[in-house]
Image (cartoon, rainbow, N blue to C red):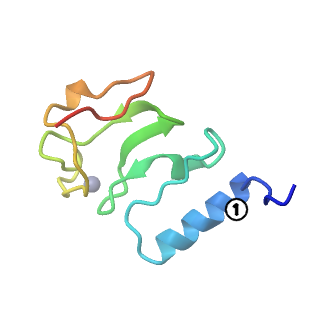
Amino acid sequence: MTEPDNTDAKTLIRAAEIGREAGLRYVYAGNLPGTVGEYEDTHCPACSYRLVKRRGYVIHEYNINEEGKCSKCGAKIGGIWPKNPSTVGFNGFGLPISV
Ligand SMILES: [Zn+2]
């Protein structure tokens, strides 16, 4: 019984805010699905467009094109993304699959 309590949503959100204020481009706080608002999703660092909408491990929306760029403004998004965005799985373990 010496372990710390689980981190609550308020603390996760504050940590995400600190990260964003410090200049981190892809702040994500998805440990408590449905409780951290916009911090559960990935947003474009250039135009703030929602690139990936998630709840837990489930992807509900995916807006990164085949070149790994924001589908709205064309900014390059850091990461390895599927060459064919239509292969991104929804409603399950929607992790982008092999590139
Ligand atoms: Zn953008």
Residue found 33% across the figure and 55% down from its top: 44
Vertical placement of 79 versus 53: above or below? below
Q: Is residue 51 above or below residue 78?
A: above
Q: Residue furthest top?
A: 91
71 sits to left or right of 16 = left
In which quadrant of the rendered image does the N terminus lie?
bottom right
The C terminus, quarter of image: top left
User: Looking at the image, which residue sits at the far bottom?
Assistant: 22
Residue type at numbered disc 1 = Thr
Q: Position of residue 32 (x, y in %)?
A: 64, 44
Q: Residue at x 28, y 39 (%)?
A: 63
Q: Is mark 1 within 8 Å of ligand 1?
A: no
Left or right: 38 with respect to 26?
A: right
Quarter of the image where ligand 1 sits:
bottom left
Tell me the residue at 18%/40% (across/down): 65
Q: Residue 41 location in percent, x, y? A: 46, 46
Number of labels in the image equals 1
> x%, y% of residue 22?
47, 78
User: Residue 56's image quarter?
Assistant: top right
Left or right: 77 as drawn, with respect to 9: left
Q: Residues within 10 Å of mark 1 (few under 14, many from 20)?
A: few
Q: Position of residue 77 (x, y in %)?
A: 24, 55
At 41% from the left and 75% from the top, the residue drawn is: 23
Mark 1 lies on residue: 11
- Is label 1 in a helix, a strand or a loop? helix
Outermost residue on the right side: it is 1
